[in-house]
Amino acid sequence: MRSKVTASDKYQTAFLDEQPLFPSTRFQGSKLKIVDWIWDQIAELDFDTVLDALGGTGSAGYMLKTKGKTVTYNDILKFNWYVGVALIENEGVKLADEDVQFVLQERSGISYPTFVFDTFHDIYFTDEENHWIDRVARNIELLSDPYKKALGYFALFQACIIKRPYNLFHRKNLYIRLAEVERNFGNKTTWDTPFEAHFRQFVAEANQAVFSNGRDNRALNMDVFQIDDPFDLIYIDTPYISRRGVGVDYLDFYHFLEGLANYSQWPGLIDYRTKHRRFRKTASVWTDSGKISQAFDRLFERFRDSILVVSYRADGIPSVPELVAILKRYKKYVEEVDRTDYKYVLSTNQSAEVLLIGR
């Protein structure tokens, strides 16, 4: 279907010669490397408003923002929501040098918590680094502008990730960073770079990414099944469940960041029986192989009046034919586009990335 001329098309013709760049990211499952391929498959569809339903890193929603679309980003994890606020909802606010100085310095008259230092000793970071995280998290919380606060959290999250082996928080393994041994993976120079240097780097990247596309974009922190607004197109990129029935649990991988985003509630969220102080387990249909097919059906039905675009791994549960069959319950035309040259970080399998388009 060829698209009609929309306001977003007019915006594109007047867009800046030098487009803003999405910051570098180390989140597992990010579609950053293939967002241009995704756009190639949907560019001629007739849509103006779009919901990035399970937004994650925000790379897909951000790409659609650069195309002049009216984007609503959503993610149930609060740390991801801050990324959406900083890079998609935010139209022009940046962190100035004085803001960065405010965040980084210990200030008189402010009572700094020590929760990270007290709780995560010898788990992810050194004691000195844990003190730094406590202080910076507190100072970010004190920023009055919501977009500056979101940018500060973005930089803090990325600084924490880049100093982690595997860029994850799935096990207690600080010793990997600190051991004086020969290595065939990782980047010890990066691990040993001070937190402040990483923080400043990611502030600069985030500031460069901030722009206005002339639209009223927004970021939500909701269960996708609670969203009632109408949209022309829904972009869906759910967590992956392998053929063995093992699901990717992003809260388990990034619970430390979710804790930072919910600092005052963090003590009550932790399962203290675990060595790495993860969150207490909560049920999710997106990581349950017995419930995910029903979840897709429910999601497709909820947004049946919109164009449905699903990013998917060809070796997942449900299978692609099963997912197509579910989609056909609500859409007359379903197109399947395969990309076989994409490999996921930390994955040993070469699996095709599939885009399903239902309209």
Image: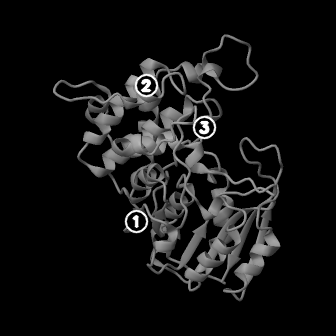
Question: Callout 2, which amino acid?
Answer: Asn
Name the image quarter holding residue 290.
Answer: bottom right
Say left or right for 210 vs 95. right
The reply to whether residue 207 is in sight is no
Could you tell me which secondary element the residue under label 1 belongs to? Answer: loop
Can the viewer see residue 205 in this picture? yes
Say few, some or many: other residues with alpha carbon within 10 Å of mark 3 (under 14 / 14 to 19 / 20 or more).
Answer: many
Q: Quadrant of the C terminus?
A: bottom right
Q: Secondary structure at mark 3?
A: loop
Query: Split into 4 quadrants, where in the image is the N terminus?
Result: bottom right
* Residue type, label 1: Asn
- Label 3 and label 2: CA atoms lie apart by 16 Å
Q: Give whichever of 279, 347 is nearer the camera.
A: 279
Question: In the image, 346: left or right of 58?
Answer: right
Which of the two marks, 1 or 2, is nearer to us in this view? 2
Q: CA distance from mark 1 to mark 3?
A: 30 Å
Q: Please report whichever mark, 3 or 2, sits nearer to the chain's N-terminal start.
A: 2
Secondary structure, mark 2, is helix
Q: Is residue 176 left or right of residue 196?
A: right
- Circle on res. 217: 1
Q: Which mark is residue 302?
A: none
User: Which of marks 3 and 1 precedes in the sequence?
Assistant: 3
Q: Position of residue 182 (x, y in %)?
A: 74, 13
Image quarter for residue 323? bottom right
Q: Earlier in the sequence, mark 1 or mark 2?
A: 2
Q: Which residue is mark 2?
A: 130
Question: What amino acid is found at the position of numbered circle 3 in the picture?
Answer: Leu
**Above/below status of 211 relative to 271:** below
The front one of 284 and 337 is 284
Disc number for residue 168:
3
| Left or right placement of residue 274 versus residue 128 in this view | right
Q: Which one is in front in this view, the residue at disc 1 or the one at disc 3?
A: 3
